[in-house]
Image (cartoon, rainbow, N blue to C red):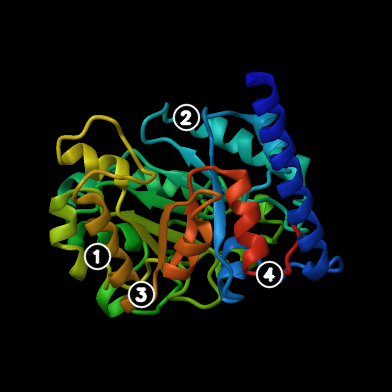
């Protein structure tokens, strides 16, 4: 009985995957040519959601080579809860380049680093701001800031990620803090000459030509209380309500991000989503194969959860032309 049921499930999965593949072939542009360095920005500009894969280790060169052909649009490289090792991150980026290009023709997938510095207050953030600069110097395409409670700390976060040659909203943000010399390896990763990198290594969408995405985690009630002000700060690209940590801050130990989430977590997500829409930011939340269509319709533009089948369903649903 159990064997028969298992065979039935496998058969249904195969049928679903085959149907998705056939649907994909009907609208994907086989002659697609990348227009930008950052694959996610290119997809956002086309009105398409993106889907990420979370690295399970802070891997180096070999993992980079392997992940160069990932199904995901962007890779989450976690240094918040795993070792802070920039040498390994550099090796990982080198591996991505050597293992590339991606199926879409981009030199590498987008890589976003979650840093182990918190946006709880200005003083503590500035003490760790060098971490943001070191991450960007490895050629990654963005940074994600945990515990983004203090709008002034988030303002310093944006300032830290910029070069002083970029002037948009400088009267609000202040002069950029990245220094000359930080661009050399990063320019190679992006496949640009050094001066071109300096021109493009700025925060998007504040700078329309920028290729760097900055995100914030509104992942506890303190951050949510200030989210209205935080998410108005120029230079941010995306935000999330961090359902696992938000639930944890409310006393729930499971770390649940998929429905049914604990009481209060879904409400926080709705508030952050509304603020993202109001301020032109992209909202990040978990998606599953059976809810990705509804989540996209609601406004989720970054599909979290590292679920390849959900990404496949979502891409077909939005008729993505870019190959994957």
Q: Quadrant of residue 285?
A: bottom left
Q: Position of residue 39 (x, y in %)?
A: 63, 61
From the viewer's side, name the closer residue of 108 and 22. Answer: 22
Q: Earlier in the sequence, mark 1 or mark 4?
A: 1
> Which label number is shown at residue 139?
none
Disc 2 to disc 4, C-alpha distance: 39 Å
Up/down of 207 relative to 314, above or below: below
Select label 1 or label 2 by which is in front: 1
Q: Residues within 10 Å of mark 4 (few under 14, many from 20)?
A: some
Q: Earlier in the sequence, mark 3 or mark 1?
A: 1
Whether residue 202 can be seen here: yes
Select label 2 or label 3 by which is in front: 3
Q: With 247 as the anchor, is 143 left or right in this view?
A: right
Q: Are marks 1 and 2 in contact (CB under 8 Å)?
A: no
Name the image quarter holding the C terminus.
bottom right
Q: Residues within 10 Å of mark 3 (few under 14, many from 20)?
A: few
From the viewer's side, name the closer residue of 70 and 234. Answer: 70
Local SS, label 4: loop
Up/down of 45 relative to 181, above or below: below
Q: Earlier in the sequence, mark 4 or mark 3?
A: 3
Q: With 262 as the anchor, is 307 left or right in this view?
A: right
> Which label number is shown at residue 319?
4
Disc 4 to disc 3, C-alpha distance: 22 Å
Q: Position of residue 151 (x, y in %)?
A: 19, 62
> Which label number is shown at residue 277?
3
From the viewer's side, name the closer residue of 64 and 250. Answer: 250
**Residue shown at 44% from the left, 64% from the top:** 163
Select label 4 or label 3 by which is in front: 4
**Residue shown at 63% from the left, 41% from the top:** 93
Disc 2 to disc 3, C-alpha distance: 35 Å
> Which label number is shown at residue 271?
1
Local SS, label 2: loop
């Amino acid at each position: 009985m159990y064997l028969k049921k298992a065979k039935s499930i496998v058969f249904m999965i195969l049928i679903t995957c085959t149907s998705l593949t056939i649907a994909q072939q009907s609208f994907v542009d086989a002659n697609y040519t990348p227009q930008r360095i950052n694959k996610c920005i290119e997809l956002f500009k086309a009105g398409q959601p993106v889907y990420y894969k979370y690295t399970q280790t802070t891997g180096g060169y070999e993992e980079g080579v392997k992940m160069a052909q990932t199904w995901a649009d962007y890779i989450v490289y976690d240094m918040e809860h795993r070792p802070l090792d920039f040498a390994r991150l550099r090796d990982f980026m080198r591996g991505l380049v050597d293992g590339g290009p991606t199926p879409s023709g981009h030199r590498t997938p987008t890589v976003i680093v979650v840093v182990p510095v918190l946006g709880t207050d200005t003083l503590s953030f500035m003490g760790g701001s060098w971490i943001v600069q070191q991450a960007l110097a490895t050629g990654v395409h963005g940074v994600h800031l945990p515990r983004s409670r203090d709008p002034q700390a988030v303002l310093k976060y944006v300032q830290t990620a910029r070069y002083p040659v970029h002037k948009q909203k400088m009267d609000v943000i202040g002069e950029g803090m990245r220094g000359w010399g930080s661009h050399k390896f990063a320019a190679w990763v992006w496949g640009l000459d050094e001066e071109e990198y300096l021109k493009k290594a700025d925060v998007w969408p504040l700078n329309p030509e920028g290729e760097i995405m900055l995100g914030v985690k509104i992942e506890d009630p303190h951050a949510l209380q200030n989210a209205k002000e935080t998410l108005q700060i120029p230079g941010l690209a995306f935000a999330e309500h961090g359902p696992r940590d938000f639930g944890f801050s409310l006393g729930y130990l499971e770390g649940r991000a998929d429905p049914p989430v604990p009481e209060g977590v879904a409400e926080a997500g709705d508030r952050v989503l509304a603020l993202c829409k109001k301020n032109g930011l992209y909202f990040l939340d978990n998606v599953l194969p059976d809810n990705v269509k509804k989540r996209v319709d609601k406004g989720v533009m970054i599909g979290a959860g590292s679920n390849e089948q959900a990404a496949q369903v979502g891409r077909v649903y939005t008729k993505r032309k870019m190959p994957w």
